[in-house]
Amino acid sequence: MPARGDHDARRADVSAAVWRVLAARGFGGLTLRAVAAEMGVSTGLLTHYFPNKRALVRHAVDVAERHTDARDRHAAAGEGRPALRAALLDVLPLTDEATVMSRVWVSYWDGALADEEFAADQRRRYDRWRARLRSHVDAALPGPGLDPDDLVATCAAFAHGLVVQALFDPAAFPAHRQVALLDRFLAELFPA
Amino acid sequence: MPARGDHDARRADVSAAVWRVLAARGFGGLTLRAVAAEMGVSTGLLTHYFPNKRALVRHAVDVAERHTDARDRHAAAGEGRPALRAALLDVLPLTDEATVMSRVWVSYWDGALADEEFAADQRRRYDRWRARLRSHVDAALPGPGLDPDDLVATCAAFAHGLVVQALFDPAAFPAHRQVALLDRFLAELFPA
DNA sequence: AGGTGCGTACCGAACGTTTGTTATGTACTC
DNA sequence: GAGTACATAACAAACGTTCGGTACGCACCT
């Protein structure tokens, strides 16, 4: 917990609390009072740092994206297929913390689908993510005749679809199986 | 609109209204008043046919599953890979009606993640869906050494991940591209 | 044939709770 | 003393649920 008055750090605290509430109660259960209770503060603090709930949610999701992004850069040591593998591993619910973030995103999809502005944000987020994956796919392109954008969309689809299945059935999709599934998938799509 | 008093048909009407509200406003925006307004009736009708909101939602999603299952084209699509292709096409948002149903499911994921009972329902639904796909995969197995359950999970992941991307960016994922992506995906996974 | 009674179908309002937002108050810092 | 950083209380709106009331259809009785 940062010092009282540290504006940016406080907003980051709020965002982390939003993630926890979102992961535990879903977008429908995301209320200012729940976030405040999660932080052990009053709703007055939230309204002090954010003009309204919409801005609060938006900031929390923005920070979440940068959070995952930072994790991505850390893991991606190589280039091409290993980098692509690392980038996809970053979005799978392989750890407790990654599971929380995965739940944040899946829950947020609901809110984003129902709200035009959030939906536009989410579309741009997907664009950015695919653009990031694209650079890795380009370096790993198995041969001519294959559209790299299609490959990127296919990889993104596989990853997010696996996230959803793993969230609903963690016992059937332990971390090692998720990794194995990803590796087999990549082996098929990018034959060495 | 069926005759007044047709119990089962009336419950099906309510379920269809739930789908429309879910697709338009998301799980968080799913309220009894919104469903009643969508049907042009009062909330009293809803409470007459369902003991509470939870039961209403549960029934609506159950009907939705049977709805998609009935649409299943694999009955007319032969066996093996063509049947698998048809079954996966059935869950993609290729038409307006299919888009509504896709939005229903993605929105419902949020509610299901936040509710243990709904989550268990959803896990069983995934199990049933994968079991259905499994029979097609078995008939299309490209060779030994590949786990059919892994192939099924991979196909399911690809399909649902594509659904999400297509919902957020319909312009970038028109029906023909979704079909092309699926066909290329299947061609890689099940080489003829 | 024509009332009579009763169950089903449904409306519309009310209840208490919870929501986002706004305001007022208070303590601490500079 | 001014301004920032909160807590606390109040607000209307909207929520799920409950409930009294009405309209209709069908069995039954004479």
Image: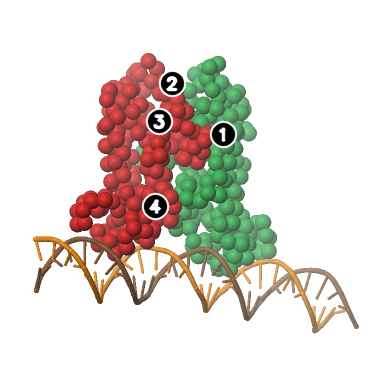
Chain colours: A red, B green, C orange, D brown
| Residue wearing tag 3 | A154
CA gap, disc 1 to disc 4? Answer: 31 Å
Identified at 55% across, 49% down, the residue is B117
- Residue B24 makes an appearance in the image: no
Residue at (45% x, 25% y) in the render: A180
Q: Is residue A56 left or right of residue B35?
A: left
Question: Horizontally, is A9 left or right of B186 in the view?
Answer: left
- In the picture, which quadrant includes the C terminus of chain A? top left
SS for callout 2: helix
Q: Nearer the viewer, residue D9 or A187?
A: D9
Give the spatial CA distance, label 1 vs label 3: 19 Å
Looking at numbered disc 4 in the image, what kind of residue is underneath it? Val
Give the foreground label among 4 and 3.
4
Is label 1 or label 3 in front? 1
**Label 2 sits on what residue type?**
Glu
Location of mark 2 (residue): A188
Which amino acid type corresponds to the residue marked 1 in the rendered image? Answer: Arg
Tell me which chain the residue with mark 4 is part of.
A
Q: Secondary structure at mark 3?
A: helix
- Among the 4 quarters of the image, the one containing residue B164: top left
Q: Are marks 1 and 4 in contact (CB under 8 Å)?
A: no
Q: Residues within 10 Å of mark 1 (few under 14, many from 20)?
A: some
Of the numbered discs in the image, which one, if any, rests on residue A21? 4
Residue holding disc 1: B130
Chain letter of mark 3 equals: A
